[in-house]
Amino acid sequence: MDFMEILLSPICGAIGMGIAVLYHLIRTKQIRRNLSIQLGLLHNSPVGLVYVQKNRVLVNKTFCLLLDVKRPSRWESFLELFPTEIQTVLVEKCTQLKNDKSPFEETIFFQKRAFRVRGQMQENEAFVLWWTDMTAPRTKVLKETHKNKVLSEQKNLLENAWEAFPLPVFIRGKGEKALFANQAVGKDAKTLNALHWVSLPFSVDSKTFTLTYGQETHTEEELQSLIREVSGAHQRLCQELPCAICLFGAGGQMLSCSHAFADLWHLDEKWVKSKPSYEDFWDTVQEKGLMNRVMDFAQYKKQQHNQFASLSETQEVFLYLPNGKIIRRLMIPFASGGVIFLDEDKTV
């Protein structure tokens, strides 16, 4: 080994040691930076996180914001955030989680909100609880469930009404295929052949259907009696429907309306029984302040009456009330020139 080798040997060793230390520092800094990023993501996650190990609790910021609580550090202090009934559920589920090692999912109602809580085991007997606020989706589901229930009730009511209808009725689609027939169609062929059949086309969602019904040949007195009976059935049906519906005769007289329609327009029961006119209806609505004021109300009523009288197919209109409600109204042509109003609250 010459002089230069002896001189460079400790220098090279020092440089190597320095490089190793520098690499270690850079590596440690990178690890801390990655850890900081991961912690930041967990704290700002849209889902609340609760980490429990040996009675110690760590929670992220989202959990504290969701429940509007201070950050607990122990399992006992975490449980004290909730009323007794929720504590019981959490203890039971978490105990089962630690025993069975199987994840669980539970709905917790707290502070008038609904939370989906999911539990999952981790290493070293630790477990994690994930908290998700499900209030808005649950409210939407409940509204849709209620809407479906109302529709189902209406469907059942209409089906029963059609089955009780004294005349045989068919509904046919394209190609003369029968889509519906009530039980009156079950009469013997001889009776059905003796009837006078009437067909009425109608459209739903741009599809054309044909309503065909058969009626017997009666004396004028019998026909009048039958008309009164059918008219009375229609009026009773209209009164019992759970939706906001009103039936007007060809002359504009209010024949019947449901309780929901009367409630929507604040109509007095005694006033409804007096069978007011279409113009009287608008006068009453205007007097109660349920419609926006117009410069020429007489002209407005005339326009509404003309629209009523000339109705030949279903029309849709939107009524914007002063109280902020938005009402979708279907004006449906009815038998003998009558019109059905079907109102639905579309306020967001």
Image: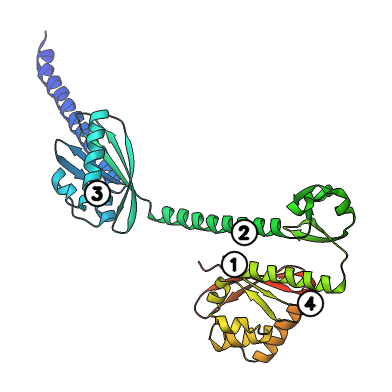
Q: Which residue is mark 4?
A: 310
Q: Which residue is mark 2?
A: 157
Disc 1 from disc 2: Cα separation: 9 Å
* The quarter of the displayed image where residue 311 is located: bottom right
Disc 3 from disc 2: Cα separation: 42 Å
Viewer-nearest of labels 4 and 2? 2
The residue drawn where x is 66% and y is 82% is: 275
Nearer the N terminus, badge 4 or badge 2?
2
In-front residue for pair 244/315: 244
The residue drawn where x is 63% and y is 84% is: 274
Q: Amino acid at mark 3?
A: Ile
Disc 1 from disc 3: Cα separation: 43 Å
Q: Label 2's element?
A: helix
Q: Label 2 near label 4: C-beta < 8 Å?
A: no
Q: Label 2 near label 3: C-beta < 8 Å?
A: no
Q: Is residue 62 left or right of residue 263?
A: left
Disc 3 from disc 4: Cα separation: 62 Å
* The quarter of the displayed image where residue 121 is located: top left
Q: Which residue is mark 3?
A: 86
Nearer the N terminus, badge 1 or badge 3?
3
In-front residue for pair 2/173: 173
Q: Is residue 71 left or right of residue 207?
A: left
Q: Label 2 near label 1: C-beta < 8 Å?
A: yes
Q: Label 3's element?
A: helix
The residue drawn where x is 70% and y is 58% is: 164
Above or below: residue 278 compared with residue 13: below
Above or below: residue 29 compared with residue 110: above
